[in-house]
Image (spheres, grey):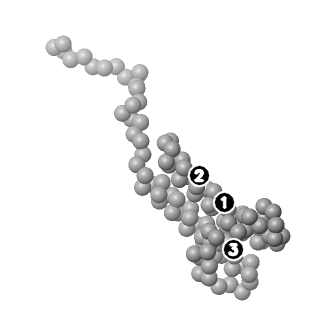
């Protein structure tokens, strides 16, 4: 795999992972005022900001799960579409087939 598709895949997994970790932090009721939980929560909130208020549920945790979950799904689909749009290197031209003999022309 070349460098660009690998980079797109790593960024997509990181973004979706941060959003999912943010959902889990909210569901667990972790203290987000300091430390790693606060940093992950801030990053997840920033990534899910475009999806804020898309759906309104009756609880704060339900709002976070639905809207941030939607953000994670959209980011995963966007990353997959970008990966699919990138050109793939063709290995068939470089592949050597030692099991296949070259045909000799009868007049040569």
Front position in the image: 3 or 92: 3
Q: CA distance from mark 3 to mark 2?
A: 23 Å
Image quadrant of residue 28? Answer: bottom right
Q: Residue at x 42, y 45 (%)?
A: 88
Label 1 secondary element:
helix
Local crowd at mark 3 within 10 Å, few (<14), some, or many (≥20)? many
Q: Is residue 22 rendered to the left or right of residue 72?
A: right
Residue 69 in view: no
CB within 8 Å, label 3 to label 2: no
Residue at figure coordinates x 52%, y 59% from the top left: 79
Label 2 neighbour load within 10 Å: few <14, some 14-19, many 20+: few
Distance of label 1 from label 2 (alpha carbons): 10 Å
Earlier in the chain: of badge 1 and badge 3, it is 1
Give the residue at mark 2: 10
Residue 95 appears at what percent x and percent y? 41, 30
Could you tell me which secondary element the residue under label 2 belongs to?
Answer: helix
Q: Residue at x 18, y 13 (%)?
A: 108
Q: Pick out the residue farthest to the left.
A: 107
Residue at 67 percent across and 67 percent down: it is 44
Sequence-first disc among 1 and 2? 2
Return the residue at label 3: 65
Q: Nearer the viewer, mark 1 or mark 3?
A: 1
Measured as percent of width and height from the top left, residue 91 is found at 41, 36
Residue matched to label 1: 17
Looking at marks 3 and 2 on the same chain, the residue that comes earlier in the sequence is marked by 2
Is residue 40 depicted above or below 86 in this figure?
below
Between circles 3 and 2, the one closer to the viewer is 2
Position of 72 relative to 54 (above/below): above
What is the x, y in percent for residue 43?
67, 66
């Amino acid at each position: 795999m070349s460098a660009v598709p690998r980079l797109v895949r790593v960024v997509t997994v990181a973004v979706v992972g941060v959003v999912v970790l943010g959902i889990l932090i909210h569901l667990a009721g972790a203290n987000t005022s300091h430390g790693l939980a606060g940093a992950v929560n801030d990053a997840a909130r920033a990534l899910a900001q475009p999806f804020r208020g898309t759906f309104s549920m009756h609880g704060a945790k339900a709002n976070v799960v639905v809207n941030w979950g939607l953000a994670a799904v959209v980011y995963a689909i966007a990353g997959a579409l970008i990966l699919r749009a990138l050109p793939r290197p063709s290995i068939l031209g470089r592949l050597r087939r030692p099991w296949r003999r070259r045909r000799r022309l009868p007049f040569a």
